[in-house]
Image (spheres, rainbow, N blue to C red):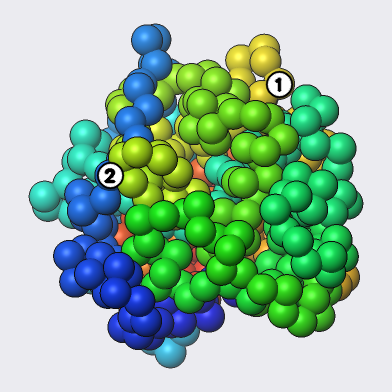
Amino acid sequence: MIRLFSLSFLILTLIISGCSVRKARIQTGAPNIESYKSFDNYHFSNHNTPFCFDQCPNTSLRGEQIFVNKSALNTNAVPLREFLENTPTVAFAIIRNDSVLYEYYEEEFDETKIVTSFSVAKSFVSAVLGIAIHEGYIQSVEEPITRYLPELSDKRFENIRIRHVLNHVSGIQFPSLAWTYYTHDNNRLLQKMKYGKGPGKEYVYANCNTLLITLIIEHATGRKFQDYFHEKIWSKIGTEYEMLWSMDNKKDQNLKTFCCINGRMRDFAKFGKLYLQRGKWNDEQIIPSTWIDQTLKYDLTDGSTWDNEYFWYLGPKEYGYYYAAGLYGQYILIYPKKNIIILRFAKRALHFNFMWQDQLIQILDQL
């Protein structure tokens, strides 16, 4: 689960095993919201006719009218604005029916400032995979990964299905989290991974699972991930600003698809809107609705966890919300019952996923 990943990431990034990774670690530092400036970045252009959310009148009042508890141990409710000011939150928004109900930015931030998303990016990769399957490049998630990655010479890899990788139950022994984040050569991934325990044994959150799905998409489509993603999603959802996605190096231009999408909060909200509309934008079905249905199933088979499916997180069944999540508490939350999207981006801080779930539910209950 992401709460385990967050702590592991903070610890493991301090343990650097290779010279190239050590050098990158020194140059870049621990992950933070401006780390993208130390990486090479692929630039995605904004839409010629951007979609703009409506702005509700007196939006600032919402910050005084919604109350949340500071923590599970502190039941004294405070206004949402005060709560946000006392957390490392840099940007926060509540959107309902395409209207911004409430928006908060830390003092040096505003709607034009870049925020980074960390593992929120994994949910973008999931969407692209669903499109590739719908278009026939990949038959299904039940296919063995070796069908698209013939470089894997160990015959045991034939036991691993795409869905095992999607649900972090692949059983593969991957390079360290530090290597994944700081490496300047994603192409070495297949050489560095080992078969391990095999699929379906246990849930082990690993960034490299996302990189592996990316390679499968690229091998299946015969295209660079960024080109396929731009054509199928980014160019169609009315983005207002340029978006940067960090890469391993300028020459190979392999995206760090497990993290590192850097853009403006309202453009991230458009990806949330796409999912809220069950993959449809205007009159075009961009992501198959059947793929979204698969994503939202609570699956405990093969060692999967109930709250993580296809690189998305699922909230309590009685609420039915789901969310993309990233390090330090970055969120794109979709709540279909009330047609709501909630977004939150934050600075570096020790963060566990459960620390925000209670507050998000409190907010949803008051809308």
Residue at the limit of the structure toward the left, as seen here: 108
When asked about the image quadrant of residue 304, the answer is bottom right
Residue shown at 72%/49% (left/top)? 149
In depth, the one of 220 and 78 nearer the eye is 220
Residue 222 lies left or right of residue 327; in this view the side is: right
Amino acid type, label 1 = Gln
* Horizontal arrangement in the rendering, residue 215 relative to residue 227 (left or right): right
Specify few, some or many for label 1: CA neighbours under 10 Å numbering under 14, 14-19, or 20 or more.
few
**Residue 309 image position (x, y, % from top left):** 72, 59
Question: Which residue occupies 61% across, 69% down?
Answer: 193
Percent x, y of residue 114 = 25, 42
- 295, 155: nearer the viewer: 155
The tag earlier along the polypeptide, 2 or 1, is: 2
Which of the two marks, 2 or 1, is nearer to us in this view? Answer: 2
Which residue is located at x 22 percent, y 69 percent? 23
Among the 4 quarters of the image, the one containing residue 316: bottom right
Mark 2 residue type: Asp
Q: Residue at x 72, y 59 (%)?
A: 152
Answer whether residue 19 is visible to the viewer in this image. Answer: yes
- The residue beneath circle 2 is 40
Residue identified by numbered label 1: 285
Q: What is the crowding at mark 2: few (fewer than 14 residues within 10 Å), some, or many (at least 20)?
A: some
Quadrant in the picture for residue 244: top left
Percent across and percent down for residue 320 are 71, 55
Q: Secondary structure at mark 2?
A: loop
Figure label count: 2
| Location of residue 123 in the rendering, given as x and y in whole percent from the top left corner | 58, 49
Secondary structure of residue under mark 1: strand
